[in-house]
Image (spheres, grey):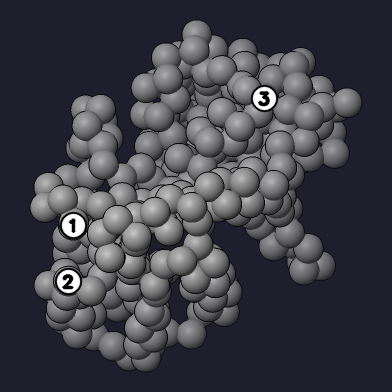
Amino acid sequence: MSILIDGKATSQAKREALTQEVAAFREETGCQPALAVVMVGDNPASAVYVRNKHTACESVGMYTETLHLPEQTTEQELLALVEQLNQDARFHGILVQLPLPKHINETKVLDAISPDKDVDAFHPYNVGALVTGRERFLPCTPAGIMELLRFYGISVKGKNCVVIGRSNIVGKPMAMLLLAQDGTVSICHSKTNNLRQITQQADILVAAVGRPRFVTADMVKEGAVVIDVGINRLDDGKLCGDVDFDTVAPKAYAITPVPGGVGPMTITMLLYNTLTAAKLAVSGK
């Protein structure tokens, strides 16, 4: 029977430790870490994520404020708000909830966030810092995955690591973090030839492709660690990941479920980035 990597339990343990860190920081500096969350429109899934982030911040002793803008907000209006938040010393972190309405250029908005307050680690400055090993903030989902591996005592050093997916949010930074821990990393995508042959060599397989049950048992090496980043809603309303859990789990040494695997860790790492941003603000670095 494979080990079930429990993201909820890991996240809870990390948040308990973070609560103590935040309390110590507030006592030492008199500063409460604060996160501004900007949401445009009424996407139901985004609304759930924003509420979860709000609750998580408050649970560890951070301040958070959600600025909810109407769907018809213009790009210039949103950029003006981001600049206002950049200059507002009350907030140490800024998060713009994605997706944005189609008439707004997401890249332009994310690039407008100050690198010092970019707790999602999407800004080109922070991406470059990650690639060169000088990061201040780590992308939340990949960082959460690395914490899960550490929590379960799974070493990356010397392992064949395969990432399916090359997005800027998960795939590419995931590869960088695995490489930083001395993994031998391959990135696969929709144009990859012989995908199955590559994934069958993976000691650690990360699926972030956004296709329900894409990874099947014949793609997985016996005894592999399988990390499922996907969260897909089926026609019957149920959630499933990018991995066909029922067939892959018996072959895996360890595997994350969906839901309850990677997801809880993403918000937890956002909280750590917010504390880091507050520390940077206080130190003036």
Q: Nearer the viewer, residue 200 or 278?
A: 278
Q: Amino acid at mark 2?
A: Ala
Residue bearing the label numbered 2: 89
x and y percent of residue 258 in the render? Answer: 71, 50
Labels 2 and 1 touching (C-beta < 8 A): yes
Q: Nearer the viewer, residue 240 or 176?
A: 176
* Alpha carbons under labels 2 and 1: distance apart: 9 Å
Q: Earlier in the sequence, mark 2 or mark 1?
A: 2
Q: Amino acid at mark 1?
A: Ala
Q: Residues within 10 Å of mark 2 (few under 14, many from 20)?
A: few
> In the figure, residue 139 lies in which quadrant?
top left
* Alpha carbons under labels 1 and 3: distance apart: 38 Å
Up-down: is 92 above or below 249? below
Q: Residue at x 53, y 24 (%)?
A: 162
Q: Nearer the viewer, mark 1 or mark 3?
A: 1
- Local SS, label 3: strand
Q: Earlier in the sequence, mark 3 or mark 2?
A: 2
